[in-house]
Image (cartoon, rainbow, N blue to C red):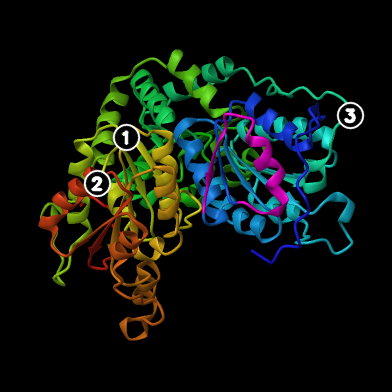
Amino acid sequence: MSPAPAPTAAVPLAAAGQDLAPRGADLVVRALEAHGVKRIFSLSGNHIMPVYDALLDTDIALVHVRQEAAAVHMADAHARLTGEVGVALVTGGQGLSNGAAALFTALGAESPVLLLSGQAGIGELGRGAFQEMDQAAVARPMAKASWMVESAEALGADIARAIRIAREGRPGPVHLALPVDLLEQRLTTSQPPVTIEPPTAPDAQAIAGRLAALLESADRPLILCGPALCTPRGRGSMARLEAATGVPVIGMESPRGVNDPGLGAFAELLAEADLVLLLGKALDFTLRFGAPPAVAASCRFAVVDPDPDLLARAAKAKGPLLVERVEGEAGSVLAALAASPPAAAAARASWLARAREALAFLPAAWANARAASGRIHPVELCVAVRDFLARHSDGTLVCDGGEIGQWPQASVKTQNRIINGVSGTIGASIPFAIAARLARPEAPVVAVMGDGTFGFHMAEFDTALRVGAPFIAVIGNDARWNAEHQIQLRTYGAERTRYCDLLPTRYDEVVGALGGYGAFVTDAADLPAALAEAHASGLPAAINVMIEGVPAPVIRRG
């Protein structure tokens, strides 16, 4: 961070035994407590020290990280796994700009995150204040909403409003800028915590009735759910909907879209469908914009979405083939449809069986996949991870990286999973893993990442040690930015593959030097023991696996 001006003397909470009126910072933490916040992810700085002081009088835990983006990534992972709003707290200036970069991942994942940033005081704005910038404008393109609180009295109400916006409709991140002079200001009147109820949702039962009739008219329907439903709770709801309707229900949260290897041969299913129902799933690049040949030219679409702009976009893309579009909350409609499903049909039973087979498909050649270079093939790495998590069924899988992250998504199936999401950005897996372990401290966490990803937030191993959040990072080390290297190979040829090389660094030794557990693996046969030893160590661990740099899988049958 930039050098700070000389600190001023701290103001005690009470003087000569006399209670003082609450500060703006006290309203902030009271509002967070009133909304059930139990943990905040943060990096300290001048503008937010009043909030740090106010937190001392609460039961809210503060996880102090090493870089602001890590705090936002942790809040994102916490939100996805728990269903709660994840809260991050950063300081002003570059503290906010660092943290805001991670909002893009949360926005793509439809993750309810509240980013609070301190900032220069209102009384100094426009006068060249320390670290002055228009922070609300910086965060706005990457958030559902972003604004600056304008009075100390409004702090509690604005926190409540921000949490409501983060949760309602299509969930996503919200940013609030908190001027430091408002945080320090003493209030002269009592300000009770404010809670704001969400607006009344459309009638989910009525919507479900219309959708059930539409599904009955189709022979090969698909129900596609967006990232907000790709959580542990959401996946359980999707499974219940599929069982009730006999219609394949598929969650989509990967930037690979129709080529997501975690969905097996999904591309062939989509091309055969005669009706696609999108529940909170945007009609975007991940579905090739609903255009042939990815989708049959005659395929009808129905869309349920809380965002009128996305409904209008779908109508423009599909025209008369959009046979139903309705503004509604996807989770509520999903539950209502499961409660009042369409009548069963023998043809759909056959279609469901075909869909399940296609989605589970893995190439037979993977059973014998070996690296040609004398290193370890990503499939061999994933077999070891799969077998480890099979012994820990409550565990969480984190996948990250341009190429390496696709292999475990395809071949390691767990109920609890966090991936980088539709944004396609990499680097979040170490913060994700720490937050996952804190959210579910009894369950192991395995994060599979590339060596490029590891470099983003390796210092957060220090955080994991300080807060007691052991996890296992399995690093697929091919000594390059492999996704971009593969683009060069495909587009420009082997003789023009430049600039994407890294060193075969001993990342395990880096983690060992920080106080964690490290293992270096060059033989696939050693992977099971390395995983077992890392778990038994009770420490944040890095298993540095020297892999062959192969392209990510694109799964097709035939």
Residue at x-position 40% and y-position 70%: 484
Q: Which image quadrant for residue 515? A: bottom left
The amino acid beneath tag 3 is Thr
**Picture disc at residue 537:** 2
The amino acid beneath tag 1 is Ala
Label located before the other in sequence (3 or 1): 3
Q: Where 80 sits versus 257, above or below?
A: above
Q: Determine the residue located farthest toward the front in the rendered image.
A: 16
Residue under pointer 1: 443
Asked if the magenta segment contains residue 542, the reply would be no
Q: Which residues are magenta?
A: 44-65
Horizontal side of residue 509 vs 74, given as left or right: left
- Coordinates of residue 446 in the picture (x, y in percent): 31, 46
- Coordinates of residue 117 in the picture (x, y in percent): 69, 48
Q: Where 30 sits versus 173, above or below?
A: above
Between residue 154 and residue 103, name the one nearer to us. Answer: 154
Residue at x-position 54% and y-position 38%: 321
Residue under pointer 3: 188
Quarter of the N terminus within the rendering:
bottom right
